[in-house]
Image (cartoon, rainbow, N blue to C red):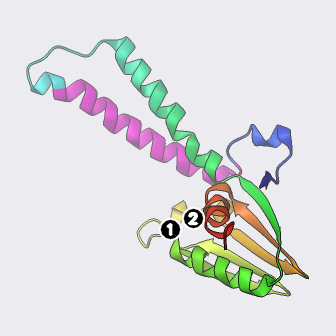
Amino acid sequence: MHSVLPAWRQILLFQSPRQLASYGAGTLAAAATGLCLFIGLPRLMGYGAIPPDVLAGTLALAIAISLRVPYEVQPVQWRVSSAYPGLFADRAAVLLASIDYLPAERADGRILYRLAPAPSLPWLRWRECRVEVRVHGADVTIIGARIAVRHLHRALKNA
């Protein structure tokens, strides 16, 4: 598996303005909720305020950990040569369906899968989450979000 993006582009974790906006909104909401709990809950229970350095450290750590999400949807490519590429692609389709990826487009030896959105959160659909499976001769190429391709790689490497 290797990254599809050039090295300089991998530093920019966010692949689109929509991805940045939805990530920012989610992180801001989680940070606001966390700060309310950190500041309000101790006072309700009769304790003193939490020191600002503890709050700042906790917030910085939470933001750093949450950056894992955009890293996991960066596109990677995995190419496999198989004696039975059609069977391999069918097995990949079953595994993708098990993690809620549905076929969206079909063309000559190429199937594009998109993550099935939650009905209440359609704005969280990032096009970067798609996975493409191409069959060309004996080669099967899978291009898509790092987390989905890694799941396929682990499940299919011994198949």
x and y, in percent, of residue 75 in the image: 74, 56
User: Secondary structure beneath disc 2?
Assistant: loop
Question: So how many labels did they put on this image?
Answer: 2
| Circle 1: residue type | Pro
Q: Residue at x 83, y 85 (%)?
A: 109
Q: Viewer-proximal residue, 133 or 16?
A: 133
Is 66 above or below relative to 39?
A: below
Helix, strand or loop: magenta stretch: helix
Is 59 above or below relative to 23?
A: above
| Circle 2: residue type | Arg
Question: In this rendering, would 131 be left or right of 125?
Answer: right
Binning the other alpha carbons within 10 Å of mark 1 as few (below 14), some (14 to 19) or many (20 upward) gives few
Residues at circles 1 and 2 in contact by the CB criterion of under 8 Å: yes
x and y, in percent, of residue 39 in the image: 25, 24
Question: In this rendering, would 40 be left or right of 14?
Answer: left
Kindly indicate the quadrant of the structure image that contains residue 13. top right
Q: Residue at x 50, y 68 (%)?
A: 122
User: Secondary structure beneath disc 1?
Assistant: helix
Q: Residue at x 79, y 60 (%)?
A: 77
**Residue marked by disc 2:** 125
Question: In this rendering, would 100 be left or right of 39?
Answer: right
Specify the label residue 122 is tagged with: 1
Specify the label residue 38 is tagged with: none
Q: If the image is split into quadrants, where does the C terminus sit?
A: bottom right
x and y, in percent, of residue 93 in the image: 64, 80
Whether residue 34 is in magenta: the answer is: yes
Q: If the image is split into quadrants, where does the N terminus sit?
A: bottom right
Whether residue 2 is in magenta: the answer is: no
Q: Which residues are magenta?
A: 15-41
Estimate the spatial distance between the alpha carbons at disc 1 and disc 2, rounded to whole Å.
Answer: 6 Å
Q: Viewer-proximal residue, 150 or 116?
A: 150
